[in-house]
Amino acid sequence: MPHSVSPANSGTPDQVQDDMVVEPQPQAENGETQNTASPEIPVVVNTEPENGSTQGDEVADQDMAMEDVGVQGEKVLESAVKEESKSEVKLEDLFADVESDEEFPSSAALNVKPSSPPEAPSSPVHVGPASKPSDSDVMRSFYQRLFPWRHLFQWLNHSPTPSTDFGHREFAFTLQNDAYLRYQSFPTSDLFDSLRKDVLRLMPSRFEIGPVYTTNPRDRKTLRKSSAFKPLAKEICFDIDLTDYDDIRTCCDKANICNKCWQFITMAVKVIDVALRDDFGFKHILWVYSGRRGAHAWVCDKKARFLDDQKRRAIAGYLEVIKGGAQSGKRVNVKRPLHPHVARSLEVLKSHFQTDILHDQDPWETDEKFDRLLQLLPDKALNEALRKKWSSAPGRASTSKWADIDALAKSGASKTLDAKALLEAKQDIVLEYTYPRLDIEVSKHLNHLLKSPFVVHPGTGRVCVPINTKDLESFDPLEVPTVTELLGEIDEWTPEGEKEGKAVQDWEKTSLKPYVEYLRSFVVALMKDEKDVKVKREREENTADAMEF
Ligand SMILES: [Zn+2]
């Protein structure tokens, strides 16, 4: 099927260069490249991996046509994950501890009470109005009492039983002094508790999650052949940030956001989520608020995790419709007839364009601003008529201006008007103002690191909570709890109507509860699919063994 946004279209020399960047630096929330170690701290910072996942031959392959993604991608995906099989293992047995409210399943070994982890202070944390999210007492309390360690472990491990999915996973810590520690890993003998302990010891301002490697990342230097250390698997991630909308958002700028401009993120989640599900067949997509003005998607399906960089680039290319920066000319160049993904996106975005763009953002209010609109319209004579009308009515609302285009076109303002060209230009404008603006570099590489869900954004103090897409419209980033609010809620909590003998976790006492519960249900569904695949594979192996005799 022809596609108007195939990677072939984007294979400019510049982008080929970009693709050769082996190790994309993790991006800070504000888009700045993450600082490396500060000089006074003797921290070894690896910015170069010992091996590159991106080789010259992959660059040569980057002209892979879009059609290949659907077909070839699906094939690879299918072979990785066949149809779900009915398992004979009882789910309840396998996930017995999933539903347990005990945050620390290894507590038998640790000998701690469920509701009070080893380092938890016995007295309440006193968080006053002067407490800042970045205070180390505040952060320590958060990581000790609220961070959903067990669910994070199960999410990355894909099973309640320890595996290399977690043990060979890279974590990277950004310390308070901005030192950046890569290749941290947590072998599974003591489950996720070693990750938790290291976080409490180092108190990073944030930590990121990278790929699963062929071996324990901490052992990479001891390998005889450095090529034996390779990234194997990672979720495909997508990053949408409101800074990329600054040329069209009029309500806020820089780090500020409000509910009006958050709608850009809502639109983006809708368009990307449906494409990932319907066009690529992915099921386990975790959307996470980035803590300030954006959202990340983690596509966690097994078939997504094992895709190589070439296929990641192809998927990213498939979803990329807006190209170039704010200074570029026309940023949308889609072919006709519209690719089904673009046509579907337009359907989703149409009503948002009327309310969230024309009404709320009012992007063409002034003379200077409506010039941008005229630049995107194809007919000279019609443009002149529009300019005349709008210049004589200063401040005419964008909703009216948009309606004027068709009204003047119908009135015969231009003798040479090409109605089809006008319609297509208007579709392109809707896309330019509403279609998701992806930071595509995040999606292209298997070994890209991305901030973990549930860490605290150091600037806002807000927790990077998951976004329930079933309730997407009601997600309000300004209502997301901050770390200091949450710690206050623990102190204020009083037991009432509590079930006898049931320990209440600290997170259950706070407004973090729905988000932790959402992660838990997400993880349970993911583990169920992984288990079904595993059971099927084992059964096939057993059958194969049996056939040999
Ligand atoms: Zn705003």
Image: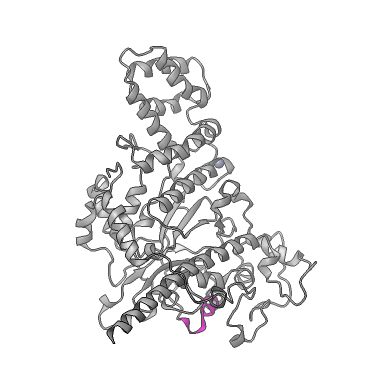
> Which residues are drawn in magenta?
188-197
Residue 196 among magenta residues: yes
- Give the main secondary structure, helix, strand or loop, of the magenta stretch: helix
Q: Is residue 409 left or right of residue 69?
A: right
Q: Is residue 124 left or right of residue 167?
A: right
- Vertical position of residue 534 compared to residue 441: above or below: below
Q: Residue at x 38, y 12 (%)?
A: 412
Q: How is the image coloured?
A: one colour
- Vertical position of residue 168 compared to residue 360: above or below: below
Q: Position of residue 205 (x, y in %)?
A: 53, 66
Residue 29 visible (yes or no): no
Depth check, front residue: 514 or 282: 282
Depth check, front residue: 499 or 531: 531
Residue 459 visible (yes or no): yes
Q: Is residue 321 left or right of residue 260?
A: left
In terms of image quarters, where does ligand 1 lie?
Answer: top right
Count of marks overlaid on the render: 0
Q: Position of residue 542 (x, y in %)?
A: 36, 81
Residue 174 among magenta residues: no
- Vertical position of residue 387 compared to residue 68: above or below: above
Q: Based on the displayed image, in which of its 4 quarters is residue 371 positioned? A: top left
Q: Position of residue 345 (x, y in %)?
A: 42, 41
Q: Residue at x 23, y 54 (%)?
A: 62
Q: Position of residue 102 (x, y in %)?
A: 64, 76
Quadrant for the N terminus in the image: top left
Quadrant for the C terminus in the image: bottom left
Q: Based on the displayed image, in which of its 4 quarters is residue 380 positioned? A: top left
- Vertical position of residue 418 compared to residue 165: above or below: above
